[in-house]
Image: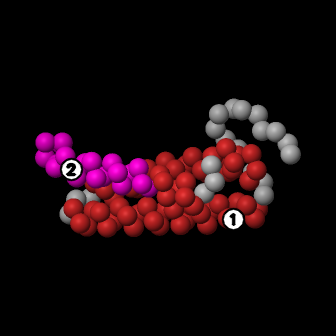
Amino acid sequence: MLQQRNKEHVLLSAFVGLESAHFFSAFLPSYFTIRKFAHGDTEAMNSLYAGMVFALLFSVALGLVVSALLEDPLPLIFSAVVSGLMLVVYRAAMLGYLPNAPRRAL
């Protein structure tokens, strides 16, 4: 597969995937902050969902633009995979899942 693809396309796709993760950190607080303070707070949860939507839109838009410029679907695929993983991680933090460190009451 790599022989068929231009290595520069793969590198640019990796950068799109990395930037997709950065969109989530730009629009949302850290995993640890969400896990500690947002669990059960409806207003905070709604704000987090809004941040997830904006991050997803920016990520997919970047993937679409770079894919169109390169005429290769790989950047969009990288963007979609990384965005999906980030959505799972942030949603798990909102629900209080992931490593079994105890949550402290405020």
Q: Is residue 10 magenta?
A: yes
Tell me whether circle 1 and circle 2 mark residues in contact (CB < 8 Å): no
Callout 1: helix, strand or loop? helix
Residue at x-position 73% and y-position 61%: 44
Q: Which residue is mark 2?
A: 8
Q: Please name whichever residue, 86 or 14, is drawn nearer the observer in this view of the structure.
A: 14
Q: Residue furthest left?
A: 4
Q: Where the C terminus falls, by quadrant? A: top right
Q: Residues within 10 Å of mark 1 (few under 14, many from 20)?
A: few
Tell me where residue 71 sits by quadrant: bottom left
Q: Residue furthest right?
A: 106
Q: Position of residue 32 (x, y in %)?
A: 67, 44
Q: Amino acid at mark 1?
A: Asn
Horizontal side of residue 77 vs 86, given as left or right: left
* Part of the protein shown in magenta: 1-20
Q: Amino acid at mark 2?
A: Glu
Q: Where the N terminus falls, by quadrant? A: top left
Residue at x-position 49% and y-position 48%: 85
Q: Which residue is mark 1?
A: 46
Q: Residues within 10 Å of mark 2 (few under 14, many from 20)?
A: few
Horizontal side of residue 87 vs 71, given as left or right: right
Gap in angstroms between the C-alphas marked 1 and 2: 39 Å
Residue at x-position 53% and y-position 66%: 54
Residue at x-position 25% and y-position 67%: 68
Q: Position of residue 90 (x, y in %)?
A: 60, 50
User: Is 2 rendered above or below residue 27?
Assistant: above
State the colouring used for the structure image.
secondary structure
Labels 1 and 2: the sequence-earlier one? 2
